[in-house]
Image (spheres, rainbow, N blue to C red):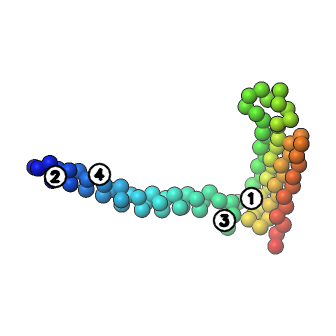
Amino acid sequence: MSTQKLLAALIVTVGLPSVIHGKDDARIVKKAIERSTLHRPGTKPFHLKALLAPARNPEQNVNLNGEIEIWWASPTQFKREVRSSEFHQILLQPSR
């Protein structure tokens, strides 16, 4: 088999599946994004509380500690509260 034919066969063998799988990969990524958003109908209610602190010397950087709390009922009804020693914010999204 000549070098050109061998090279062409190699390109088709290696390249064709990547073109075919490229479309599948894009579809898979799109589906993952759709499933990862909270603003999707049918998202189950939840409550989340996260405590934040610096990874290095947390006792020396007490003013960098914080807390985020989310109460989620639906995309149109939720509450988010962010607290630190220097900042406090509450976001309410009431039902419409």
Q: Are marks 1 and 4 in contact (CB under 8 Å)?
A: no
Q: Residue furthest bottom?
A: 96
C-alpha separation, residue under disc 2 versus residue under disc 1: 61 Å
**Is residue 94 in view from this perspective?**
yes
Q: Nearer the viewer, mark 3 or mark 1?
A: 3
**Crowd tier of the residue under label 2, counting other residues whose Cα lies within 10 Å: few below 14, some 14–19, many 20 or above:** few
Residue at 45% across, 57% down: 25
In the displayed structure, would residue 86 be above or below residue 39?
above
The amino acid marked with disc number 4 is Val
In the image, residue 91 above or below residue 59: below
**Mark 1 crowdedness (10 Å alpha carbons): few <14, some 14-19, many ≥20:** few
Q: What SS does tag 3 mark?
A: loop
Disc 1 versus disc 4: nearer the observer: 4
Q: CA distance from mark 1 to mark 4?
A: 46 Å
Residue contact at pointers 3 and 1, CB within 8 angstroms: no
Q: Residues within 10 Å of mark 3 (few under 14, many from 20)?
A: few
Instruction: Work out whether residue 47 or residue 28 is closer to the camera in this orientation and state it.
Output: 28
Q: Are marks 2 and 3 in contact (CB under 8 Å)?
A: no
Check disc 2 and report its element: helix, strand or loop.
Answer: helix
Residue type at numbered disc 3: Arg
Which numbered circle lies on residue 45?
Answer: 1
Image quarter hosting the C terminus: bottom right
Q: Position of residue 11 (x, y in %)?
A: 26, 53
Expressed as whole percent of the image width and height from the top left, the position of residue 74 reads 75, 64
Residue underneath mark 2: 4
Specify the amino acid type for callout 2: Gln
Q: Which residue is mark 4?
A: 14
Q: Could you tell me which residue is drawn at 31 percent across and 54 percent down?
A: 15
Distance from the alpha carbon under mark 2 to that under mark 3? 52 Å
Q: Give the label, 4 or 3, closer to the camera.
A: 4
Q: Residue at label 3?
A: 40
